[in-house]
Every structure is written in structure tokens, then in C-alpha cells.
Image (spheres, rainbow, N blue to C red):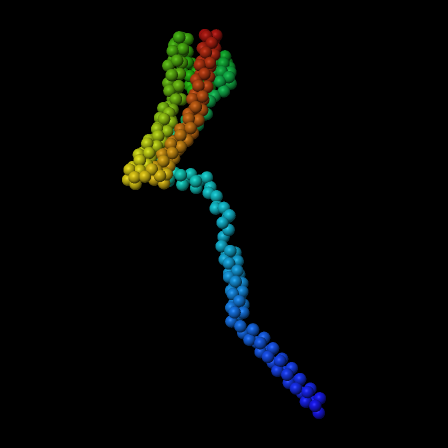
Amino acid sequence: MKKLIAFLSVAVLLSIGLNKTVLAQVEETNDPAQQEMVAETNSDVVTASSVAEEATAMPLEDEQPEKQTFHQVLKEKFIEGGAGFMAIVLLCLIFGLALSIERIIYLNLSTTNTNKLLNKVENALESEGVAAAKEVCKTTRGPVAGIFYQGLDKYDEGIDMVEKSIVAYGGVLTGRLEKGLSWISLFISLAPNLGFMGTVIGMIAAFDNIAVVGDISPAVVADGIKVALLTTVFGLITAVILQIFYNYCVAKIDGLVNDMEDSTISLIDMLSKNK
């Protein structure tokens, strides 16, 4: 009997100890500090996930902006230089190019194969006479053919009159070839001068800003200096482009004049033999 009572007492004590242990664990689980720690951990996880989502949503800083085309850059710089003033330089370029293209077309159409023309004129003179030679010159394009026609037209009046007619008409044709070159030369000189004028105006504007603000910082004078440099650049570019076309026209005219002089000497020799 005593053993049974002792066993029951030990069982009751063990059950009480187990209940206290379970209650302690429950209290530790319900501890505010531990709950706060768990909450902070959860909030850190949420914050990290939100930062990751924002980093994913935001564009990368290393991404380069879209490159502008040459036309867009040119338009932007044209406006920055002052559209009103830059338009004058642009008009110089347009008019100069129009005159240059017209001269190039005219000069290329005036080019003639002088050796072939001389052979045709000589054959016509020997076979059918002066009238046939004049008809050949009349149907041939170019200043050389025109000079030949004038010389043949004075053939009956003698070689001296042929030479005088050729010299006089050659001067007229040379003037026609050089027509418009003076205007191209004017635009070549005018474009950079307008650019330099823009430089002076831009510098005046920069000094005006300095006087108003009372500071000489780069931000104050940047706009005026930009206008000054852009107008000068556009003026010089216009002059360079027109100068190339002008030199081509001059070289073409020199070649035509040389052909005219050489061919007229050959024509006079030919007429002197057939006299």
C-alpha cells in the first residue's frame, strides 16, 4: 500500500512539472520581445522584397539615351544659333548652290569634242563648201561651234575679217560662260562675314548678361558665346561648300576657253589653205 501511494505521488509530481514546462514554453512563445523580433524580421523581409521590386521597376542608370540623327542635331544647332540670323546664312547657301548648279549644267552642255568638229568642218569644206560647213556648226552645240560659225560667215570678206569676228565673238561667249560667277563669289564672301557678325552680336549679348547679373560665371556667358560660335561655324561651312563649286566652274571655264583658242587657230589655218 505504501508503494502504491509513493508511486501515485511521483506521478502527480511529474505531471505538475510537465504542466509547468508547457506553460513556460507557451509564455516564452507569447513573449513580446520575441514577437517584436519576429515582426522586425518579417518587416525586413518585406522591405528587402519591396526594394528589389523597385530596383527591378526602375530603369538602369547606365542606359544610354537615344542617339540623335545628323538632321536632328543640325536642326537643334540651327535653332540655338538664332533662327532669324542663321536663316540669312542659309539663304546665302541656297542661292549660291542654285547658281552653282545652273553654271555646272550650262558648262557641261557647252563642252564639245573639238577634234571631231574640226574634222566634220574640214570634210564639209572640201566636199560641199562653206555653206555645208556652216550647217555643221549650226547643228552642233557649244561655244566652239558658235565661233566656227561666225568665222565661216565672214569667210568671203577675207581671213582678217574672220580673225576679227572670231576674237569679238569669243569675248561675248566668254562673258556668257562666266555669267553668275560674280554672285557666287559674293555669297562666298558674305556667308563668313555674316558668321563673324553673329560672333560679335553673341559676345555683346554675353557682356550684357555679365553687366546685368554682375557675375562672370560660365553659366552667364554660355548662351552668348554659343550663338557667337555657331554662327561662325555655319558661315564658314557655307563658304567652303560654295568655294568648291566656284573653283570647279572656274576650272571648267578655263578649259572651254583654251579649247576655243586652240580650235580657232586650227580653223584659220584650215580656211587659209582652202582660200
**Which residue is nearer to you in this view: 234 or 166?**
234
Is 42 on the left or on the right of 176, as rendered?
right
The image shows residue 174 at horizontal and vertical percentages of: 39, 19
**Which residue is nearer to you in this view: 47 or 132?**
47
At horizontal 32% and vertical 39% (from top left) the residue drawn is 215
At horizontal 53% and vertical 67% (from top left) the residue drawn is 37
At horizontal 49% and vertical 54% (from top left) the residue drawn is 58
The image shows residue 244 at horizontal and vertical percentages of: 44, 26
Residue 98 seen anywhere in this rendered image of the structure:
no
Is 152 on the left or on the right of 47, as rendered?
left
Quadrant of the rendered image containing residue 257: top left
**Relative height, residue 233 to residue 42 (above, below):** above
**Which residue is nearer to you in this view: 180 or 21?**
21
The image shows residue 246 at horizontal and vertical percentages of: 42, 25
At horizontal 46% and vertical 43% (from top left) the residue drawn is 68
Quadrant of the rendered image containing residue 88: top left
The image shows residue 103 at horizontal and vertical percentages of: 41, 26
Looking at the rendered image, the quarter that the N terminus falls into is bottom right
**Which residue is nearer to you in this view: 232 or 226?**
226
Which residue is the extreme one toward the bottom? 1
**Relative height, residue 255 to residue 97 (above, below):** above
Is 35 on the left or on the right of 232, as rendered?
right
Which residue is the extreme one toward the front? 2
Looking at the rendered image, the quarter that the C terminus falls into is top left
